[in-house]
Amino acid sequence: MATWREVERAVPDLAKAVRERFAVRKHATLATLRRDGSPRISGTEVEFGKKDVVLGSMPGALKARDLQRDPRLALHSPTDDPQPGTESAWAGEAKLAGTAVERKPRKDGAHLFAIDVTEVVLTRVEGNRLVIESWHPDRGYQRRDRN
């Protein structure tokens, strides 16, 4: 696992592009695991700090309880749709996977979680090719192109 700072050091261009994809809108999509192991998706706000990626939750929210029980998660960036006829200009989407580490709750009781990153993925279009860039702490950087 890695902190966001470690991701930025390892793959600065990919980290910058991923951060830009998460900044296109305020709300990202968070996937957690329910008590029975089935998936739950929730909206969440994501903050890229100097060291970590952090997300929050209202006190007692189901997504917070999910993360307290099983810290595995996936985050999907907001997306922008290209104008019709300009699909090759799609800026793409970003995904992060990892585990949540709960920080001290805020005074209002809100939960805060830092993410230990296990995967970073950026998917975008270049001309007529789909480009998938990824980084894992153990495997490093990879790029795959598909026609």
Image (cartoon, grey):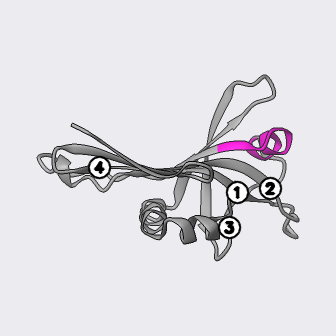
The range drawn in magenta is 63-73
Amino acid type shown at disc 4: Asp
Which residue appears at 48% of the width and 60% of the height? Answer: 22
Q: Secondary structure at mark 1?
A: strand
For marks 4 and 1 on the same chain, the one whose residue lies earlier in the sequence: 4
Residue 69: horizontal and vertical position, in percent?
85, 39
Magenta stretch prevailing secondary structure: helix
Q: CA distance from mark 3 to mark 1?
A: 7 Å
Towards the viewer: 57 or 66: 66
Residue 129: horizontal and vertical position, in percent?
22, 44
For marks 4 and 3 on the same chain, the one whose residue lies earlier in the sequence: 3
Q: Which mark is residue 101?
A: 2
User: Which residue was labeled with disc 1?
Assistant: 115
Q: CA distance from mark 4 to mark 1?
A: 28 Å
Q: Looking at this rendering, what residue extends furthest in the bottom direction?
A: 50
Quarter of the rendering containing residue 72: top right
For marks 3 and 1 on the same chain, the one whose residue lies earlier in the sequence: 3
Which residue appears at 80% of the width and 38% of the height? Answer: 70
Q: Secondary structure at mark 2?
A: strand
Q: Is residue 119 above or below residue 16?
A: above
Q: Which mark is residue 81?
A: 4
The quadrant in which the N terminus is found is bottom right
Q: Secondary structure at mark 3?
A: loop
Residues marked 3 and 1 touching at CB (< 8 Å): yes
Mark 4 or 2, closer to the camera: 2
